[in-house]
Image (cartoon, rainbow, N blue to C red):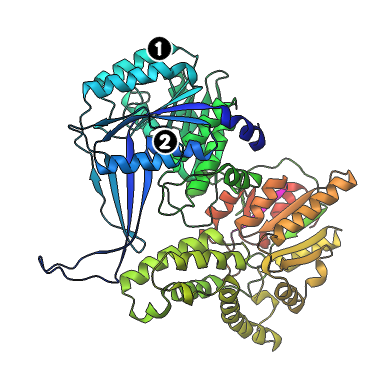
Amino acid sequence: MNINDFRDKAPGLSIAILGDVCLDLYYFLSQENTEVSVETGLRTNSVKEMKFEAGGAANVAVNLKHLGVGRVDLYGIVGSDSYGKALRDLLDSEGVSTECLVSQKDNWQTNVYHKVYEGQRELPRYDIGNFNMIAPRSRQTILKRLEENLESYQAVIINQQLRNGVHDGNFQDSLNRLIKHCGDSIQWFCDSRDFNDVYRNTIHKLNFDEALGLYGLHGASDSKESPSSETLLRWLGSYWNRSVVMTRGADGASAYDASSEDVFDIKGLHIIDRIDTVGAGDAFLAALVASSAAGMPLKDAAEWGNFAAAVSVTKLYETGHPSLDEIKAISRSPEYRYNPVLASDPRKAEMLPETQIEVIHLRKDRMMPEIMIFDHDGTISTLRQGWEEVMRDLMIRFVFGNHYEHASLKELEDIGKTVDGFIEATTGVQTILQMRGLVKLISSYDYVGESELLSPAEYKAVYNRNLLEKIAQKVSLFESGRIGLDDVTLKGAVPFLCRLRDAGVTLYLASGTDQDDVREEARLLGYDTFFNGGIFGSVGNPDRDPKRVVLENICREIGSSGRNVSCAVFGDGPVEMREAKRNGFLAVGLISDEVRRFGPNPRKRERLILGGADYLIPDFSWSDSLSSHFGWSLY
């Protein structure tokens, strides 16, 4: 089922959500217009902005409406207080039915999370409703209304996140009887922090830690090693005799389909922008249930949930409500994270015997590739070595603006960590995209006013100017003969290119660096003529990544020729690895040390494996061993 088919079906769906209804209040503090209280002598906090967001079961309900579900009924309790009224008004504005939402006057306050932010820092939260007690009348009213409406629903979601919420012992017993009475006529889903084992006859959506807790609690294994996702899912599926969906954060999700007894892995997605994980689980659940209710198989529904969660985490300081268009956009060309367990643990590395070549995915094809695509910086050339330091220094200064000289060491450290993470996540993409991200980063802090912000192109110009000054020093030394080609290229790179050219391989160079610059640098270093397929770089269009353009052109050529044309991609960044993986080409990652120009840089290993590399080499001095492994006749 595609997005358009679901869009047609969604208005006819009817889904109920039963559980803990909450309200999130966001406060954004500012140092402006603060004063010292006359009464207390204490400095006040000035709230520049505040907003309401639905939380808990209410957030799931809002997410369903944003996905286009026609009827969404919310069952739960709010207090007879101003927060309860505010939450009802919010839900009414989103089109969520509150007819089954009970107001309880005694022993119940609307569950409210007061979230306070000072710049990027979240201060301690203030929670209301932790001492609630459900009244027998409220319990009876909720369950009676649910029972009366059950036949009209395709799916019912059980939400639980509060210890002192609606799910007391009597509520659990009554709801379980109702679930048992319905049998399989309705899809029941359970998303519970504490009571997964209570609502057994449901499709469970839980996270890895919750699954692991259940696995250990029931003595499933005495092994000291953590079980795999598949082991957990098969055990839970057998234990409950139901389908199970398990989320794994950045590493995606896994699902067990009870009807087929199959386990499916859904890969995590690489997110370039800063993330806020609040509400991601609710977004996942809403998309999972809505698509399942529309008739989508569990594997596909879980993948939709994964896409929805990925959209949600990019929405900062809110609970995140992905739309169908946003899910469609991210699903068109998803940036997957591959082999996360192996990537995070170097001890699991498997090497070709007597080499420094790590095998991630053993390729059995032994044909000499007709086409090879090379990244430039860090793969062949080291002229731009140190670009990260240049970018890091400038980004920190850009974020602080005029406040830079007066920033505290703690502020400098915090911003530095944020910038480091951003550069790590965006290595290999076009510089203009990094500058787009920089603008968002600057805007999320209070140091630089909107009128002082530059455009991404202007920030890029400053960065390029600083970087080119650094490169110019190396170029001058090279042109004067004080350093040679071996001093500015990775070990064995140029001889390897020469052998490939002589063997008749069509060579392409594809770089995220501006096209004029990469062509000039290749000419300067004397290997531009090796790339008989062409040299491609960024032309300032963030929607047309040069590496993707080259691969698209090759795929088009393959398709038009009708031949089985083989291709290999070499690079030290995750972008080219993902493009190779997406097209089924051999992906060889360079974990290159650009300072020494030989030997491994362990910091690159994780990002290249997550990008989808099949093999990792430290430099091209191992090209003979790699060629021998594949049977290429080059040596």
Q: Position of residue 570 (x, y in %)?
A: 69, 57
**Rendering coords of residue 84 (x, y %):** 29, 39
Report, in whole angstroms, how far the alpha carbon at label 1 lies from the one at label 2. 27 Å
Assign the magenta stretch its main secondary structure. Answer: strand
Examine the image and state in which quarter residue 415 appears: bottom left
Indicate whether 425 appears above or below 468.
above
Using the image as rendered, state which of residue 428 and residue 273 is in the foreground.
Answer: 273
Residue 4 in view, yes or no: yes
Q: Return the residue found at the far bottom.
A: 480
State left or right for residue 112 relative to residue 40: right
- Checking the image for residue 180, the label placed there is 1
**What is the quadrant of the C terminus in the image?**
bottom right
Can you say which quadrant of the picture contains the N terminus? top right
Relative to 365, residue 623 above or below = below
Residue, x 24% and y 45% (percent of image)?
Answer: 127
Looking at the picture, how far across and down is residue 545, in whole percent? 69, 60
Amino acid type, mark 1: Lys
Report if the CB atoms under discs 1 and 2 are less than 8 Å apart: no
Q: Which residues are magenta?
A: 585-591
Mark 2: amino acid = Phe
Residue at image position (52%, 46%) is 310
Magenta span contains residue 382: no
Specify which label sits upstream in the sequence, 1 or 2. Answer: 1
Image height check: is 166 above or below 356?
above
List the residue tagged with mark 2: 208
Q: Secondary structure at mark 1?
A: helix
